Amino acid sequence: MASADLRDKLDCSICLSTYTYPVTLRCGHNFCRDCIGQVLNTQDEFGVYSCPECREEFREWPVLYIIVRNVVESILCTEPHQEEITGICCTYCIHSPVPAVKSCLMCEASLCDNHLRVHSKSPEHVLTDPSTNLEKRKCSVHKKVLEYYCTEDAACICVSCSLAGEHEGHRVEMLDEASEKKKKKKLRNVLQKLNTRRQETEERVWSLEDHWRKAQEKASGEAARVTALFIDIRRRLDNLEKKVLSEISRQEEQRSLSLSDVIQKLEIKKAELSMKMRHIEELCNMTDPLTVLQDPDTGDLCDPEEGGGDEDTGGHDKTHDVDVDGITGMLHAGGEVTAAGEGGIYGQSPADILLDVNTAHNNIQISEDLKTVTWTGIRQNRPEIDERFQDYPQVISIRRFTSGRHYWDVEIRESLEWRVGMCYPSIARRGQQSVIGDNNKSWGLCGELVYNQYSVIHDSKYTQLRQQISSNRLRICLDYEAGQLSFYELCDPIRHLHTFTATFTEPLHAALYVYGSSIKISGGGCEDALT
């Protein structure tokens, strides 16, 4: 048993409690590991460390020696510690409490080491581990120690119960044997099952923690990707803003120069007219008719120019205004590139644009991958079905679009005449009303190589494009909910050609018309929703 003086020496001088993970400095003084660590941390900023006891200084973080931990643990594990755990004291030590080491079932008393030495050694005095419930270990009828277990009544009994009591003739077992069979074996099985379940739970916890860690890493990566994406979008928008503002400034400067020239010419014209007016007024105020009649300029003055001379000054028309349509096209094209054109914010996947052979006219061929349509003078002899275009070399896609934002690209190969666009499935399959754009069920962009003309068409209304198309690659963009179908030329930079606005009432299919060569679907994607 440790003395009080020795216990006092196991107290940390910093926290004043028994050492926890004790360590020793080079000077020989002992402290709790965490306590001395906190003290040394506060001394970091001074660049020198010192012992809280003797103030010995160390130029570097001192080495902490673990040399007294075993001593502390061995002392704390002695009898006083057991006393704290059991709380059972000797029955006969009345002057001061002394921990009990055994209990006698016969005497119903607990004994310390000293009283155990003088205790009776006779067999009826059964000694057990210290206990406060000694009466429960005796038979309530015969007041004898419970030594047996009745297997028939599942009860603990004494020897008298077995020989002459109510359990006479019953099969009995020793308590240790019965405990092993009846309880401990089952408890071991339960323990094994619980251990298995605990291992499974630990594995599940590890799996969830691993999943959580990976989810955090994925979220961090996605956040970084989105941040980089928005930085790129802002850069693109800044460049687009500079480009559009520069174009507006250029047009404004050009317009200013043009108007300045016109104003200068008009000022000269105004001066000439003022001079003629003054001369005419002078002639009108003369009283001598001969002078008036003989004036050499009278004929010219009486025959003023028609139209005020606007043809000389150019007049004022819309050519001097800012090209609003051009600026809008630049904004539209730039916005399309930023949001959808080249891997934008919504994340794109290839659109499944495949051509429907069942709708193909018999004078066009469809490639095996269902991506290319080619004009041919050889009739394909496909079966005559209601879905097939009968009079014009057209085909539509298998896929139909009922929502979302989508785009698809085409590559036109020296076709004499072509049309690309979208149509309702209810479009006619015979006659002029079946041609893309020549009805109110389709919208198209068409080109005629012979006349070098390009137009957009819907419901038989043609709108000729002001600009020529130099690239053979085009993009068709659909925003179903917004009711917009746009066409772009895939040049550098991408150029907006035209946008149809409508309220779509049916699903839409991609539609192609080709005469003279071929059209290939070269790519596509979708922007389903901002979700």
Image (spheres, rainbow, N blue to C red):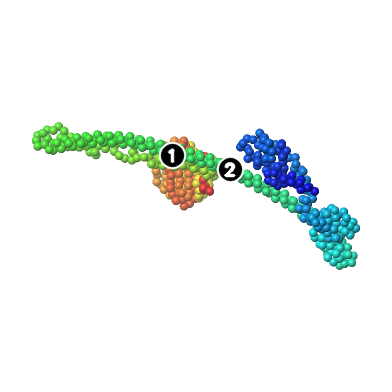
Q: Classify 10 Å Cα crowding around label 1: few (below 14), some (14-19), many (20 and above).
A: some
Residue at 63% from the left image edge and 44% from the top image edge? 213
**Residue 426 vertical placement versus 376 (above, below):** below
Indicate left or right for 503 with 315 as reference: right
Secondary element type, mark 1 = helix
Residue 364 image point, x, y percent: 50, 42
Q: Amino acid at mark 1?
A: Glu
Residue tagged by mark 2?
220
- Residue type, numbered disc 2: Ser
- Residue named by callout 1: 241
Picture coordinates of residue 450 (x, y %)? 42, 37
Say which of 343 and 516 sits in front: 343
Q: Position of residue 88 (x, y in %)?
A: 79, 56
Nearest to N terminus: mark 2 or mark 1: 2
Residue 181 placement: quadrant: bottom right
Residue 152 in sight: no
